[in-house]
Image (cartoon, rainbow, N blue to C red):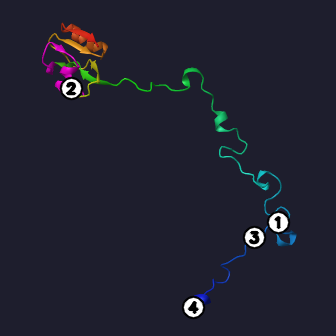
Amino acid sequence: MRLNELSPPPGSRRARKRVGRGEGSGYGKTAGRGHKGAKARSGAKAHTTYEGGQMPLQRRVPRLKGEARGRHTPAHPKVYDPVNVGELGAVEGDTIGPDELRAAGLIRKKADTLVKVLGDGEIDRPVTVRAHAFSRTAKEKIEAAGGRVEVL
């Protein structure tokens, strides 16, 4: 057997369907497309969001008005490094600021880090705490111990 003697098995190859070539072919008149409607027309193709005549999702969902539209959060929100009141006892000195917290390893080493003091834990000595923000309980605990709070 040679390559030029090979042929496909009988029945495996079919002639292409020639539609619209007369009634005798079985695919004349409507050429297998049925009667009328978008799918019977040439070039008809439904767009991707078409839902068959059902009210489209985009129109079923109510429009948002006022503050619900657009951006909700600022583009660059302030990010604080948290420090608890209980951790302040480990820092030496009467005045505790971002530099002292950085040296003690309680906040990140970046110079522009914002610090917020939170109220978890207790402080037993009077200190002046300098930070960018304080929680209400942290402020109360520091002042109850005889210390002062300075917002940077």
Q: Residues within 10 Å of mark 1 (few under 14, many from 20)?
A: some
Which residue is label 4 attached to? 2
Label annotation for residue 20: 1
**Residue 91 falls within the magenta-colored stretch:** yes
Which residue is label 3 attached to? 17
* Highlighted magenta segment, given as a residue range: 89-108
Instruction: Tell me the mark number nearer the camera, choosing from 4 and 2.
Output: 4
**Amino acid at dot 2:** Leu
Q: Position of residue 1 (x, y in %)?
A: 57, 93
Alpha-carbon span between mark 1 and mark 2:
82 Å
Query: Looking at the image, which residue sits at the far bottom?
Result: 1
The reply, left or right, for residue 28 in relation to residue 74 is: right
Asked whether disc 4 touches disc 2, contact meaning CB atoms under 8 Å apart, the reply is no
Q: Earlier in the sequence, mark 4 or mark 2?
A: 4
Quadrant showing the C terminus: top left
Asked whether disc 1 touches disc 3, contact meaning CB atoms under 8 Å apart, the reply is no
Q: Earlier in the sequence, mark 1 or mark 2?
A: 1
Q: Earlier in the sequence, mark 1 or mark 4?
A: 4
Asked whether disc 3 touches disc 2, contact meaning CB atoms under 8 Å apart, the reply is no
Q: Residue at x 26, y 14 (%)?
A: 138
Which residue is label 2 attached to? 106
Q: Position of residue 112 (x, y in %)?
A: 29, 24
Asked whether disc 1 touches disc 2, contact meaning CB atoms under 8 Å apart, the reply is no
Q: Earlier in the sequence, mark 3 or mark 2?
A: 3
